[in-house]
Image (tube, rainbow, N blue to C red):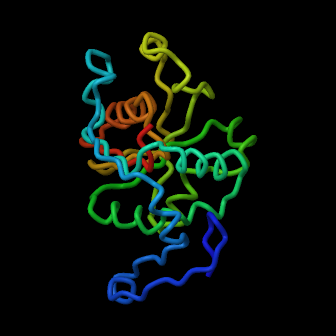
Amino acid sequence: MNCLICATPYQTTATWSKLFLYELDSSTCGRCFEKFDISKSTNDFTDFLGTPYEGAVDSVFCLYTYNEPMKEYLHQYKFLQDVALAKVFAGKLQQVFQRKEGIVVPIPMHPEKLKLRTFAQVDELLKAATIPFQQLLTKTTSDSQGKKTKIERLKTNNLFEVISTIEATNYILFDDIYTTGATIHHAAKTLKDKGAKRVDAITLIKG
């Protein structure tokens, strides 16, 4: 097997969890994987204190930090459209979601941006990790929240609309990266306005 990042051959190790718990094999060699830094911060809502979206999301868990190897990975995956790289973190994502209860809802792309990108990178990460999800949201603007100032983000109307009936009480939002938090908080508020009782969030990266 060749590493999806450096393309060098490597061997995976057989474990009991892979045999009995259907744990996914790694698609990346240990040398490449060690370059990614695990995130130590969760529930970082400081940027949103005092805003209309405070408390919309109940918890946020981010797996990795945005270091240089992660920056290179994200560029290759999202902008150079290397869809196979969705498998790199499949095993880690699978482990995290197994500890959560709720319907998984991916953060959607605006239709115009989806045409340019050609694939929904958030959906592909979940598919690679064999995590069931439901498309409950549609994005109403193609603007990037990460490029806006805090004042501009506060003036932004809600970014999402619900496109399906909210029947469950617990939901888990998933996105590739948590930067300002605007996207996650807007999505959580949209779900809660329609009846969701609890909305947690998981992201691959903390920007």
Residue 18's x, y, as percent?
39, 84
Residue 166 sits in quarter: top left
Residue in front for this viewpoint, 111 or 45: 45
Q: Quadrant of residue 92?
A: bottom left
Residue 105 at what x, y percent from top left? Answer: 43, 49
| Residue at horizontal 34 percent and vertical 47 percent from the top | 39
Q: Residue at x 43, y 28 (%)?
A: 180
Image location of residue 117, percent across then percent down: 71, 44
Q: Is residue 72 above or below residue 185?
A: below
Q: Nearer the viewer, residue 172 or 26?
A: 26
| Point 41% across, 35% down: residue | 184
- Measuring from the top left, give residue 6's x and y in whole percent: 64, 65
Q: How many marks?
A: 0
Q: Is 33 on the left-hand or right-hand side of 173?
A: right
Which is more toward the observer, 196 or 8?
Answer: 8
Q: Quadrant of the N terminus?
A: bottom right
Position above or below: 57 against 83? above
Q: Quadrant of the C terminus?
A: top left
Q: Residue at x 35, y 31 (%)?
A: 189
